[in-house]
């Protein structure tokens, strides 16, 4: 988070032009990274006719109606579809786990955490459009993104893109360059929010973004430590999450089409950089930092 915040501050204070070659190289690298993520997630989460259909329809919907509320609606609808259509198709898994008996969190703490999660999310979603202001709108955006990530860290890309680029908090090319740079540093992809916060609001913005995007998952983790042993065998939840995971494959696929591919590949040179980055990631299994470094250098030379 600190490294990405520093990178964001560097871009903000140094007046880096988004048209510079090394920035364009990072955009090309983002194409490879997201394509690799979509392919991997589709293989694991959208590998049946029904889940693949859910993924495709979800992607088409968010492309047709680009809005954070579309993402939320698609996720909710997918969960309902999963309960209705998948319940009788998935075999029960009865793996044993000590979590069935051991509950390290009391029921009171779990209920309070779960209630705080819903109050925080609902209050910000309702209050931010009405009240406005820098603090509330930013807090609402990062909390919403942190609350709706299912199936993998890369899913944060389309959520944050709609919540931060669409309102004009930062340029699309800077957003994607930061996302590409996030692959080169250790830690969860949620720390990408630190970069966005730094570009948008300096050190204070970086701190706000980092805390806000991790807060929902922290609250859900506390609740999950108590309820997971009881809930993990529920057919309703299992089928709902199966469909939701398929839907988020579609959300990430839509983000790959626009803005990642549309901004990252603008000619044969950028396509070549993206293809080589994909080979390095998918086939040669090179570390992400080396991919980002290569893309920046290749972009500086070729673009």
Image (cartoon, rainbow, N blue to C red):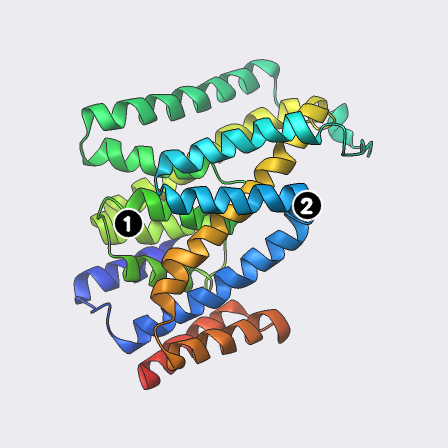
Residue at the image position 56 percent from the left and 45 percent from the top? 55
Q: Where is residue 32 shown, x and y percent of the image? A: 49, 67
Indicate the quadrant where residue 2 lies.
bottom left
Q: Which residue is farthest bottom?
A: 301
Q: Where is residue 176 shown, x and y percent of the image? A: 35, 60
Residue at the image position 38 percent from the left and 44 percent from the top? 64
Query: Is residue 3 visible in this depiction of the protein?
Result: no
- Dot 2: what SS? helix
Say if 157 sits above or below 116 in the image: below
Give the quarter of the figure containing the C terminus: bottom left
Say if 143 sits above or below 63 in the image: above
- Dot 1: what SS? helix
Q: Which residue is mark 1?
A: 165
Indicate the quadrant where residue 129 lies.
top left
Q: Where is residue 54 shown, x and y percent of the image? A: 58, 41
How many residues crowd around disc 1 within 10 Å: few (fewer than 14), some, or many (20 or more)?
A: some
Q: Where is residue 178 shown, x and y percent of the image? A: 35, 60
Q: Whole-Å distance between the Cαs marked 1 and 2?
A: 33 Å
Q: Which residue is mark 2?
A: 49
Taking depth in this image into account, of 86 and 147 the one nearest to the observer is: 86
Relative to 35, is 14 on the left or the right? Answer: left
Sequence order check, earlier mark of 1 and 2: 2
Indicate the quadrant where residue 222 lies.
top right
């Amino acid at each position: 988070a600190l490294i990405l915040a520093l990178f964001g501050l560097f871009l903000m204070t140094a007046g880096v032009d988004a048209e510079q070659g090394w920035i364009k190289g990072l955009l090309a690298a983002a194409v490879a990274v997201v394509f690799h993520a979509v392919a991997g997630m589709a293989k694991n989460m959208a590998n049946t006719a029904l889940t693949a259909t859910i993924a495709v329809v979800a992607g088409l919907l968010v492309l047709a109606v680009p809005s954070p509320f579309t993402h939320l609606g698609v996720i909710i609808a997918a969960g309902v579809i999963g309960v209705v259509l998948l319940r009788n198709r998935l075999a029960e898994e009865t793996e044993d786990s000590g979590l069935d008996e051991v509950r390290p969190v009391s029921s009171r703490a779990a209920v309070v955490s779960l209630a705080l999660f819903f109050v925080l999310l609902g209050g910000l979603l309702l209050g931010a459009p009405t009240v406005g202001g820098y603090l509330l709108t930013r807090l609402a955006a990062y909390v919403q993104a942190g609350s709706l990530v299912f199936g993998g860290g890369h899913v944060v890309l389309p959520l944050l893109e709609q919540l931060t680029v669409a309102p004009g908090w930062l340029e699309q090319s800077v957003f994607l360059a930061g996302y590409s740079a996030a692959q080169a540093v250790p830690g969860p992809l949620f720390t990408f929010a630190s970069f966005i916060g730094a570009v948008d609001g300096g050190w204070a913005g970086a701190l706000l973004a980092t805390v806000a995007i991790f807060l929902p998952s922290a609250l859900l983790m506390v609740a999950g430590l108590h309820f997971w042993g009881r809930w993990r065998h529920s057919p309703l939840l299992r089928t709902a999450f199966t469909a939701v995971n398929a839907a988020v494959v579609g959300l990430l696929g839509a983000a790959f089409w626009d803005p990642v591919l549309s901004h990252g590949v603008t000619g044969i040179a950028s396509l070549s950089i993206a293809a080589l980055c994909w080979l390095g990631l998918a086939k040669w299994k090179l570390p992400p930092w080396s991919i980002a470094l290569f893309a920046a250098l290749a972009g500086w030379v070729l673009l």
